[in-house]
Amino acid sequence: MPFSSRPSPDPSPDPTTDADGDPAQTAADGAADTRVALSVLATIDPVLRDSAVFGLVVGGPRVVALRHDIRAVEGALRRVVVDATGVIEDEVVPLEHACLSCAVREDAVPTLRRLAADGRWDHVVLALPVAAESLPVVRALAAQATPGNELERLRLATVLAVADVDTLEHDLLDDDLVAERGVGLTEDDQRAVGEVLAAQLEHADLVVTTGDLEAAATGSGLVDRLRGVGTRRIDGLHALAAGDLARHTHDPAAGERRAHPLGVRGPLPRHEKPVGDRSWTVELWSARPFDPERLLRRIEDLGTGRVRSRGVFHVANRPDSLCAWDGAGGQLCIGTLGTWDDATTAEGRPVEPHTRVVIVGATDADGEGDGGDERGRLLDAFRDVLATPDELADGGLRWLGRTDVLAPWLGARSDAV
């Protein structure tokens, strides 16, 4: 699958819709398709989820919502189906394994197929379990919504994320865990709330916000720094309409690119920020790889703290490996994605090995300045970790025979450099 290596900044001065997207064309495509529309809703807040579902079904008499909640301790799933007339189904279903993929395979797909065939509704909203990430679910649904498969009567319309700007800075940047909030999807779910929230915002076609945009200017700014290029934003649940969701068609390839580490959104175009917006973005880029030993030594300086960081990198002692960088909520995950030879741009051109990490954060509320000192420290650490031209001059021979200090995270490497 092709992925963009350096997406262009959004040229639109309007923060609610990106000019490089084509919502009119997407809406036209949706309007011409007679299949039942399927929208997917993700959030980290159970109250926001239920409020959004209520508004959608009450505002659309031919809209039905399927809501799932995973009960990990019981090994079960609660399924609730509701439309404008009220609750139609409320059942607890045993699962082979109490996990998101099992919920989709064992209950969501057959239930969605049944609702689409019923004839009473022309739009189904799948409200995911709180703290579920939309990408793996949408990927599975997209595969089934093709001719000859179980969900061929359905068309993926809009993937939306609902977020509260009043709490978003804390949710995204602090170190709360989903288990601590009682919304873990498994008994041992150790994901950070920020990790889940970031993934939801970055994959969504549409971000719906609630809260006071003026009082929470930083939370609002963080939304725009994370949501993908070409996506839409609306403010307030009152502006959320089922008809608007159904008019659009989700592009699975575009969603995959937005969520992929190669497709991370860069800094926003320069314009005057709203009063009180302390959010910032710094893009760290170099054609040079990281030195493995210095990366390990300074990885906390680059990847932890009150930031969301995401991107790709390569390491001097494994030049063919395309490595992923993904950090949020005080946690950092690094791993391999394959080889650079397998990576292409959205246009199908090869991607040259490079290191690019985009970091989003916010200046402390009681701090002064615009976060320049923190960004300066990140830049200093980044420059220190990069292999120098002199170190690379021998073609990587200096790393032969050394212990691979990153093997516990990146796996074993071959002896070939």
Image (cartoon, grey):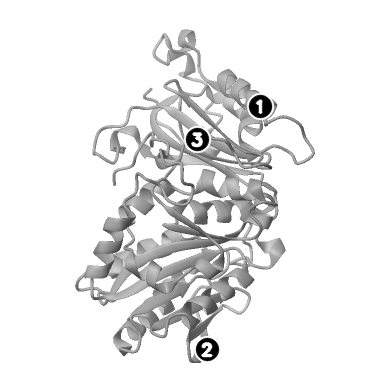
Q: Which mark is residue 267?
A: 3
Q: Residue at x 59, y 38 (%)?
A: 273
Relative vertical location of residue 237 with respect to residue 172 in this rendering, above or below:
below
Reading the chain from its start, which is encountered first: label 3 or label 2? 2
Reading the chain from its start, which is encountered first: label 3 or label 1? 3
Query: In the figure, residue 38 lies in which quadrant?
Result: bottom left
Q: Which mark is residue 372?
A: 1
Q: Residue at x 68, y 29 (%)?
A: 374
Instruction: Determine which residue is flagged by label 2.
Output: 91
Left or right: residue 305 compared with residue 2: right
Residue 184, percent from left and from top: 62, 65
Residue 341, percent from left and from top: 29, 33
Q: Furthest-right residue in view?
A: 366
Asked which secondary structure carries label 2, the reply is strand
Pick the front one: 88 or 321: 88
Residue 336, percent from left and from top: 44, 40
Q: How many marks?
A: 3
Label 3 and label 1: CA atoms lie apart by 15 Å
Which kind of residue does numbered mark 2 sit on? Glu
Q: Nearer the viewer, mark 3 or mark 2?
A: 3
| Mark 3 surroundings: few (<14), some (14-19) or many (≥20) residues within 10 A | some
Q: Nearer the viewer, mark 1 or mark 2?
A: 1
Query: In the figure, residue 277 lies in which quadrant?
Result: top right
Which kind of residue does numbered mark 1 sit on? Gly
Left or right: residue 260 compared with residue 29: right
Pick the front one: 192 or 391: 192
Residue 204, percent from left and from top: 45, 57
Q: Residue at x 60, y 29 (%)?
A: 296
Asked which secondary structure carries label 3, the reply is loop
Query: In the figure, residue 274 lies in which quadrant?
Result: top right
